[in-house]
Image: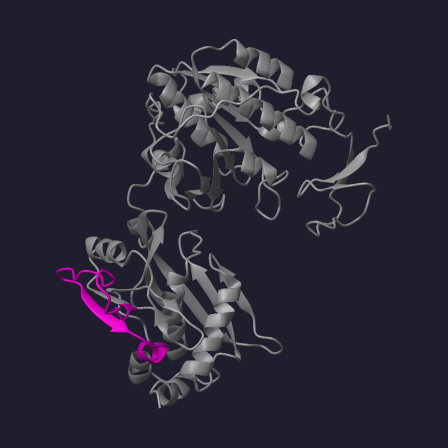
Amino acid sequence: MAKDRTRFVCQACGAAHPKWGGRCDACGEWNTMQEEAPPPRPSGPTAKAGGGRRVEFVGLQGQSRPPPRLPTGLAELDRVLGGGMVPASAILVGGDPGIGKSTILLQAAARIAAAGKRVLYVSGEEAVEQVRLRALRLGLEKAPLALAAATALRDIAASLEQESDAALVVIDSIQTLWLDALDSAPGTVAQVRACAAELIRLAKTRGFALVLIGHVTKEGTLAGPRVLEHMVDATLYFEGDRGHQFRILRAVKNRYGATDEIGVFEMTDRGLVEVPNPSALFLAERRGNVSGSAVFAGIEGTRPVLVEVQALLSPSSGGSPRRSVVGWDQGRLSMLLAVLEARCGLSLGANDVYLNIAGGLRIAEPAADLAVAAALASAATDRPTDAETVYFGEVGLSGEVRQVAHADLRLREAQKLGFAAAVLPRRLARAGRAPAALEGLKLTEIGHMADLVAPFAERSVKREAGRGGAAAAVGAAAKPA
């Protein structure tokens, strides 16, 4: 039998290579190769063809109902999970260091334990006394929570095998665990994959909900191979800045609920506090008399959210104009700037463009195109948008404004927060596609970007010297031929 040779595994994507290289051919990352021993080969009857036993197949209609979900006691966390934790499921929680991963899971674990469930919290990064100090600071020291500090997977697995009534197991974090059957160091691809697979197997067989805390790389993605995300049932990411008191928990993957669902929390000295109305939070510091600002009516998962889009234009000092984006896709901003110049005559090529989504939220849906275009037109003409108006709609390359989904939810959220008008795409004639009219909410339907830019051009004021003749260009080009 040929001797097993060591291999070099990329710690970013998990691809295996026969020899070391400075750059991974699979993902293109540099200096991520580490030498690892090959996985053990299967032996015995299961390794031979025909050595297994026949698998029993059953129908879709079962006799037993699925077990009820396990509520965490945090409404925002339950919303992200789709109603609570599912027994025998695996959940992966990632985020930047210090953003609140351990805090929110300790809060949820303490509340579940207080409800009479058996909860186990295994910490591989902190000692038991350190976890107790955090619980004391959060006011959770009296919760009947079972703590342990361990990093050896064999010890943890043996302990979990003896737990017959555990409802929730929290591992903080998966990168600290190690399996002695592997020669690689803790945190490597082989260790993370093997440890996660064994813990998920225990969760499926013993019936407890498993939560794994994962580290993130400098690019903001979960450390280790992407296969770790495929192994779990739900993947949650913490978004936000550690210097900002607000945190956003987003479901990137969820087999038992909606993806892209968000929960909003505020970091206080007593831990993470739920924010039941995130729209009011994101608009709390908005000033309606400043140019370059527009309110976007968006959808995050199943929740409508209103956020402020801010745009700022300044004369370029020379060379290539700068395009700086926070919370939105930079490529989509470049496309929208090209549409405004080519289809609406808005001259922006000589200006530095800065775009920001206020509140730390990241917007991915194309429905934000119209709000971003309104903020850019307002900044270019130095004319504020209407403070009582929201915008949503997708913009095409020819300048047309396209329909987006969930228009009724967006309009109802705007009406609930006291907005008086909405600018949205022109309705289609087909039944069921037009949003229902709401009392006290004026709807302005537009079909082309020129219809959006024209009001700003007609009421714009002249810019100061050095800003260029953008307003005059808009007035001449906003009227379609």
Can you see residue 346?
Answer: no
Spot the residue most to the right: 2
Residue drawn at x 53%, y 80% as measured from the top left: 350
Q: Which sits in the foreground, 400 or 178?
A: 400
Closer to the camera in the image, 52 or 70:
52
| 313 over 55 or under it: above or below | below
Position of the N terminus by quadrant:
top right
Q: Is residue 400 left or right of residue 389?
A: right
The spot of residue 227 in percent (x, y) is: 60, 38
Residue 198 appears left or right of 71: right
The number of numbered discs placed on residues in the rendered structure image is 0
Judged left or right of residue 60, residue 99 is right
Residue found 40% across the figure and 56% down from its top = 358
Q: Main secondary structure of the magenta part?
A: loop
Magenta residues, start to end: 424-453
Which residue is rendered at x = 71% and y = 52% of the image? 28
User: What is the x, y in percent for residue 24?
Assistant: 74, 48
Q: Quadrant of residue 54?
A: top right
Please say whether residue 479 is one of the residues in the magenta stretch: no
The residue lying toward the viewer, choosing from 137 and 293, is 293
Expressed as whole percent of the image width and height from the top left, the position of residue 271 reads 41, 32
